Image (cartoon, helix red, strand yellow):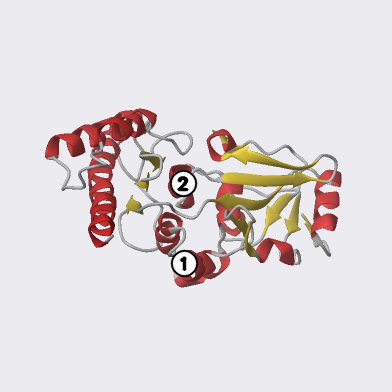
Amino acid sequence: MDFLRPESWADALALKAERQDAVPIQGGTDIMVELNFDRGRPASLLDLNPCRELFQIEEAADGRLRIGSGVPYVRIIRKLGDKLPGLAQASRTVGSPQIRNRGTVGGNLGGASPAGDAHPALLAANAVIEVESSARGSRMIPIDDFYVWVKKNALEPDELIRAIWLEPAPGPQYFSKVGTRNAMVIAVCSFSVALDPRTRTAGTGIGSAGPTPLRAVEAQDFLAEYLPWDNPAPLGDKLLHDFGALVASAAKPIDDVRGTADYRKHALSVMARRTLTWAWNDFTAERRAA
């Protein structure tokens, strides 16, 4: 196995074009597990750590945040907790402190595992993924178009993930995860919700309950129609129950060693009700304070 170490981002793109079978590595929190357990051995690894451009967090002229694919979870937690609360909450659930210091959202996207903790929050917040190749330059992929199948994404063989674009949260965002314990665990299932009071809409994201991360579209449409934006009072039991049921119906889970399909659907309905309640309570508190 070859270990490719570029001197810059341009050099990394050139190497990826030349060696399209090269697997990018940065934190190594996923690929090293595969190697250690002999579950896969790529022909070459492409080390992106020398590409310091990937470690930057920037604010664009339009106010959107551009998070380099090499930014570790710990920096998202510390720097973006107020601007991207859903993603920051998801980042706090990733592994141990050591994993959060090395692991990245870019790595989560590259691996495209349905169980990746960042995916539901990225879906709920309508992230856009910036990718680049040396031959065609950069392009932007909406998060809904990024996931193709189990551990398959929309990258071309010569492309690398450059950054993740997100709008600062216009309203409350929450993430919830079910696992066998609080730390160092792969999600049995996970869910994220993001409210946008400006457009009176909500975004959702489902993890570890389908071949790819999923969006609960009917549940979003339901909230857009029935959330009482003009009367920020506690939500009724029927609205919460119906929302949870729609989220569960959007999932496509299987039975595996971590949980059954029925349990995942039940857990998602509970998490949907809880996260929506938390988000709505924050919204009503902000309205009362204003």
Name the foreground residue: 154 vs 121. 121
Is residue 227 visible to the viewer in this orientation of the structure?
yes
- Mark 2 is surrounded, within 10 Å at the Cα level, by few (under 14), some (14 to 19) or many (20 or more) other residues, namely many
| Residue wearing tag 1 | 77
- Mark 1 is surrounded, within 10 Å at the Cα level, by few (under 14), some (14 to 19) or many (20 or more) other residues, namely some
| Residue wearing tag 2 | 125
* Whole-percent x, y for residue 67 in the image: 60, 58
CA separation in Å, label 2 and label 1: 16 Å
Tell me, for residue 207, which label it has, or none: none
* Whole-percent x, y for residue 141 in the image: 63, 39
* Whole-percent x, y for residue 213 in the image: 46, 39
Q: Is residue 3 left or right of residue 259?
A: right
Q: Residue at x 38, y 50 (%)?
A: 187
The residue type indicated by label 2 comes to Ala
Name the foreground residue: 284 vs 151. 284
Secondary structure found at label 2? loop
